[in-house]
Amino acid sequence: MPPGAPLARKAPSASSASSASSASSASSASRVSTAPDETRAPSTPRTPPPAPPDRVSALAAALAPAPAPDSLPTPALLPVETTSFVDRHHELAEGRRLLTRSRLVTLTGPGGVGKTRLAWRLAARAERAFPDGVRLVHLSDLHDPALVLRAAAEALGLPEPLPARSPLPTRSPLPTRSPLPTRSPLPTRSPLDAIVRHVRDRRLLLVLDNCEHLLPACADLVAALLRRTTGVRILATSRHRLALTEEHLLEVRPLPVPDPDGDLTDPAAHPALTLFADRAAAVVPGFTLSPANRASVARLCHRLDGLPLAIELAAVRLRVLGVDQLLERLDDRYRLLAAAGPAAPSRHRTLRAAVDWSHDLCTPGERSVWARASVLTGSFDLETAESVCADAETDTGTGTGTGTGSDGAPSLRTPYDVLEAVAGLVDKSVLTREEHWSGTVRYRLLDGLRHYGLDLLRRTPGAEADARRRHRDWTQRRVAAYERAWFGPGQREIAARLRADQDNLRTALEFSLTTPGEALAGLRLAGSLWFHWYACGAPGEGLHWLERALDANPEPTPERARALWVAALLLTAADDEDTSRARQLAAEGRELALGLTPDLRRPAAPSAPAEAAHAEYVLGLTLLSGDDPTGAVAHYDSVPAGVPAPGHLPALAALDQVQLAHALVSLGQTDRAVVLCEQTLRRCERQGEDWVRSSALRALAHAYTARKQWHRAESHAREALRRGLALHDVVGVAHSLDLLIDITTALGARERAAVLLGGTDRLRAANLWPGTTCSGRRDGERAARRDREAHLRRSLGRGPFERAYRRGGTLGLDELVSYALQQEPQQAVPETPVPLTARETEVALLVAEGLANQQIADRLVIARRTAEGHVERILGKLGFHNRSQIAAWATAQGSAAERS
């Protein structure tokens, strides 16, 4: 997924596992075990303690060889090791030593040598030295340096940041109905500052995987983290060093290969042979190294220069060839590659030979799918493969696959032909099969294999552009279908599919905006994704693409009219201090749409009347966001009701009523607001819709808050929060949490409110959280937040407030939402002293700070099991059932002590 210019998924999505070649390059996976040959499920994220002094001796002890920890924090977990790791004892020891001495260690070496897999293992073994865990940033699929910060933010589990950006274009060749105010540049934000602020007080290891094609951007990120934090260490993999003063290099060499004529009686002493035997046994059950084949295997590994990826691909060949047959074919390949001369990089000579063998295993149809699928990045589903890899002109006949396609490849006439080819590529380990959480299967080309396929595709003039155009057109059709279905029961699935397709969305947009003659299609695609950018937590990335698309398309078109109001919509979620910029863009989009005449030659273009109506909705939203509820009510009431124009978006029409309800609540007209919300909810329920429903529930909570009907308000706000989180609607989640802070305070759960306040304040301080409130009254909300904090500080007492507030500041987005959705403990707080020991009381106070058992053990310098025992005894003595009850009890005890 190229994550976006200051983007921060998941990021994507989170996030897709890098498929770079590895030291025993296993099939790409999305999680990691930290013990050799074992896998384990991810655990609950840890909550960090205050960072202790960074002593080299302590870190060195923590990095010493030891059993791997039980879990890794989420998100951006290291991928699960699904195959054995042929241990690199020297490199692991040297890597641990370097990590104790330097805050930046870079693994360098040729492609396919195993830098990625070694980094995973190093990070897993080092994890217990970092209370805040290990975070992995995948960079292999990124092409735009501006998206590096997005990838880093996604790996750190941050909500999506807003990019530093240039002003959006606003001028149109057509005159507008009335002059618009002069455009002022959008404020520049630094996502880098947001990332630094988020990790400044944390102790973690950040793994940057595959930096070589993004060196300046990676170096800038690393330099800032080294200069402005003290507890962050970086482990990078790159074919080239980052060239920073603080950098310590660890060269990763090919596996040592024994002399084929030497002593081979102990194959386990030779990692290259062990790797080949392990992978061969996976494809040829029962294969083992024997006196009869050891010398041939050693000779084969020697000819492969000990490169792990080449060894693994050779092992796959044992399904059809013997070891000696492989050696015989190797002679032809190396002679061919040697003809390239000494100027050819060694990594191309050896790695290309290995990939060539895999290519030779494929049928002509499989080779064609391999080449065409190489334009896809990240993972993709079968439908995408069928659309991109099938012949452009299909035959409605038998579809036998004979003949050739437009690029000279054997014909792939039907979806079944593509399915058979995909199945063959999965069987030959060219495509990696991935199980998506929804139960669908997705595929991925390893990075080296994808570049190999691109080289093949480029040998035919126009073939790459044709494949990329087909991919873009397929993406546009799919997004258009998603947009039509958005106001309906499939929203969660649509949102999940778009997150999974994030890399390929970016690839399609990049192709459109960098290829002559394709810019208008890029503008159409960027505008069609409005619901993804706005409703699924990516307003900053949407602005990134819309800016580029508007710059490339100054002509007056319906696509431009849509892009203008979509940009304005996203700006309302960006918490810009001055909403006049968003208002100006929406007004320009409306005037442009009203001035357009239908173009019968372009039936697929957006409907100009519908785009004008959409711009009207956004204009009302900009008034509400700009502290003008009176103007917003007048605007919404002035929009004439009638039959919707063809092409109208029902979700926006429904949101129109929800935003009007918010404005009415701000003016004290709660009765009308409640009626509007209930009408909208009934409409959403009929459609099976979630996103607008969560907005309407939030508006109802806003109305009941104004009426001081706190329990009804809490119920609606919680339901809005649940539905918003399911769609990854970061904007809606922020608004729901703001409401819950007020409601929780009013209900007397002040410690809980302080935790929520600390969490939302931290996310806002990092510029990674929408700042508007559900009522849109920004200035008034800032004052209300200050009053709220002062009230909580007075009522709780300074100490308890600070502890609760700090605890909230340690929570990530998912943790904060989970905490907000928990019911208050029903166990009454004991009023009489409880017979806890001094150490148990100390542990209870640390639980109240939000520390996990391992962090408590680190703080008190005791074993983790000892800390767990203390917590279990506390639960038993107090008659509690969970840690939240311990935290509430400890906070109350602290408050009582302070009052006394």
Image (cartoon, rainbow, N blue to C red):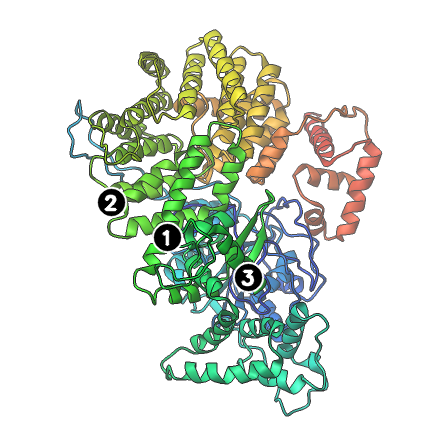
Which image quadrant is residue 85 in? bottom right
Q: Is residue 208 left or right of residue 465?
A: right
Tally of numbered discs? 3
Q: Is residue 681 above or below residue 767?
A: above
Residue occupying image coordinates x 35% and y 16%: 643
The residue labelled by disc 3 is 424
Looking at the picture, how far across and down is residue 887, in whole percent?
70, 34
Of residues 451 and 548, the one drawn nearer to the viewer in this rendering: 451
The residue labelled by disc 1 is 392
Looking at the picture, how far across and down is residue 53, in whole percent?
59, 55
Which image quadrant is residue 117 in? bottom right
Which of the two labelled residues, at mark 1 and mark 3, occupies the earlier sequence position? 1
Kindly identify the amino acid type of the residue bearing the numbered disc 2: Ala
Which of the two labelled residues, at mark 3 and mark 2, occupies the earlier sequence position? 3
Q: Is residue 625 left or right of residue 726?
A: left
Distance CA(mark 1)–CA(mark 3): 21 Å
Q: Quadrant of the C terminus?
A: top right
Which of the two labelled residues, at mark 2 and mark 1, occupies the earlier sequence position? 1
Looking at the picture, how far across and down is residue 743, in whole percent?
57, 20
The residue labelled by disc 2 is 552
Mark closer to the observer (3, 2): 3
Distance CA(mark 3)–CA(mark 2): 41 Å
Of residues 214 and 460, the one drawn nearer to the viewer in this rendering: 460
Residue occupying image coordinates x 61% and y 78%: 272
Kindly identify the amino acid type of the residue bearing the numbered disc 3: Gly
